[in-house]
Image: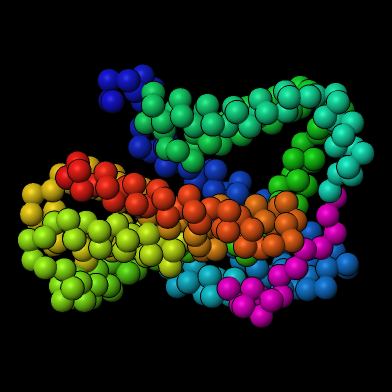
Amino acid sequence: MDALKFIHVGDTFNTTLLEVVWIIVGLITIYAGIKNLLDKENPSRVGTAIFWCSFGIVCAFGTWLPAKVSGVLVIVMCMPPIFKKVKVGTTNAPTKEHMHAQYKKIGMKIFVPAFCVAVFSLALALFSNISSMISITFGVIVAVIILIAYDPKENKPDVFLKDSERFLSIMGPLCMLPQLLGCLGGVFTAAGVGDVIAGIVENIVPKGNVNVGIIVFAIGMALFTMIMGNAFAAITVMTVGIGAPFVLAYGADPVTVGMLALTCGYCGTLLTPMAANFNIVPVAILNMKDRWGVIKNQVVVAVIMLAVQIGYMILLK
């Protein structure tokens, strides 16, 4: 794969560009906080402002802040959501008539900007050593340029800023879950949760029975992902606790087992509100009446896919 990477940038350049991206994200988030603070129609404008501004400061300046200061900001950031003091204020959502008129004008070309984000992310991942977040940012910039070209009078820079704030407000505190859950895997591993799980499983799984170990490992990945909301965080803990001592130790192929264990975790992703980006954010954006609607429609698929992945793992081990 390294032979395909035609674009090589230094680690310093990569790190600097990534910091710039996070600063932009942080500033947009701080803007959301200030806008809500000034919004008299927001019933919890102070709590909303505290949440977004704290979140934005950590995103933009967390690299340079002392660890204790960042920790305090995270605690402060979590207080308003706990007391349900983060609300959506006044939004500049387009009317149905406006959206219909824009659709008549642009048509199916509206999917081109979204497609650009995916293409740039994949292309830069395959042909460069630029980090994924920077790749996505490049794709977003191209998408913005295309949208401006579609309608220069309508799509001015402030439109994108206001829409960014609107979608942040719609998602609310759920948008911080991926970051928090990503950290949770490291915390659980450092705390020795994997060793505790190994001690429990040792009394259930017969030593040397790889097939039973695989079944427990796969189901454990799905369940732990449901708890953590993140398969990448779950696999660290579950591999230490079950995968390594009960599956890999008896000669199973680590590449095959690791890959399929992750897909088992993704089956758990389909079944949990903790995977907010996939299962809760769409509910908020689409204003669905049933907050569990997305998950309910994925249960059968998740169970079938989990069974298939377990079968694959046993056959290909």
Residue furthest toward the bottom?
83
Residue 234 drawn at (x, y percent): 35, 60
Q: Is residue 79 magenta?
A: yes
Residue 154 drawn at (x, y percent): 86, 31
In this orientation, does residue 30 appear?
A: no
- Which residue appears at 62% of the width and 62% of the height? 292
Q: Height in image: 113 above or below 54?
A: above
Question: Closer to the camera, 316 or 165?
Answer: 316
Residue furthest toward the right?
97
- Which residue appears at 9% of the width and 56% of the height? 249
The range drawn in magenta is 78-92
The dominant secondary structure in magenta is loop
In this orientation, does residue 166 appear?
A: yes
- The N terminus is located in which quarter? top left
Quadrant of res 34 = bottom right
Residue 39 drawn at (x, y percent): 85, 64
- Which residue appears at 16% of the width and 68% of the height? 205
Quadrant of res 280 = bottom right
